[in-house]
Image: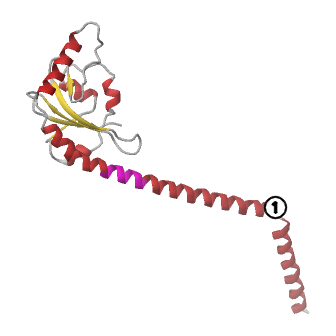
Amino acid sequence: MVAEYVRVFQSENRSMNDAFRLDNPWREFSKAIGYVLAALLLIAVVLFGLWSLIKLHRQHQRTEWMPVGLKELAGLSITDKAIHHELDDLNVAMTNTFTERHHWTSDHLLLMTNGEYIFYVFRHGNEGVVDHLFLGHASDGRWFYTTYHFCIMRGLDAPGSIAEFTKTYFAREFDGKSDVCLQHTWP
């Protein structure tokens, strides 16, 4: 008799569970939400992976550009005719009352209002992925780097000195050869 009761109870319990599974719309909805969330998670993981690969590739390109930029920078001299011409043009632009104070940059040279200058090379980065890279060799012999976005820098007023430039544009001094210049300086 007990065995018969257990068999009937199990049969009824099983049919109640089956009925609950089939007749419960929330179960199907929860299952669908689970699939959607899993798909979104998979998409997020794939996108993060692609973003990481792109960042790694661009960082590699930036690292490869650095010695080329330093070599180009080391070859710049105030005695070069083209560089001297750039300096003359900047001096005229800075003293001309009709030009604005933000005419302190040329293709290879930055002129401070006190007459100090910085030869520079620049590699454009990619916002949020890879830092910009500005490398400079100052008229006082020091080398600088910054990750400040140079396009912004060019439209602003000329700094009064190299010291003001380094403070305003988050430039750091380095030895002119090491890869320390690949470090981040600006938020």
Measured as percent of width and height from the top left, residue 156 is found at 32, 21
Q: Answer few, some or many: residues within 10 Å of disc 1's Cα (few below 14, many 20 plus, some between 14 and 19).
A: few
Residue 80: % across, % down: 10, 29
Residue at the spot x=27%, y=36% of the render?
A: 122
Q: 18 or 8, which is in the foreground? A: 18
Q: Which residue is mark 1?
A: 25
Q: Where's residue 31, x and y in %?
A: 72, 63
Left or right relative to 141: residue 165? right
Q: Quadrant of the C terminus?
A: top left
54 is within the stretch colored magenta = yes
Is disc 1 placed on a helix, strand or loop?
helix
Q: Nearer the viewer, residue 83 or 117?
A: 83
7 w.r.t. 57: above or below: below
Residue 114 visible in image: yes
Q: Main secondary structure of the magenta part?
A: helix
* Residue 85 drawn above or below residue 144: above
Q: Amino acid at mark 1?
A: Pro
Question: Which image quadrant: the N terminus?
Answer: bottom right
**Colour approach in the figure:** secondary structure
Percent x, y of residue 65: 25, 46
Given the current orientation, which residue lies at the most extreme front position?
Answer: 81
**Which residues fall within the magenta stretch?**
52-60
In the image, residue 10 above or below residue 89:
below
Residue at horizontal 39 percent and vertical 41 percent from the top: 126
**Residue 55 forms part of the magenta stretch:** yes
Q: Is residue 127 above or below residue 24?
A: above
| Residue lying furthest left | 79
Residue 22's image quarter? bottom right
In the image, 93 versus 52, the foreground residue is 93
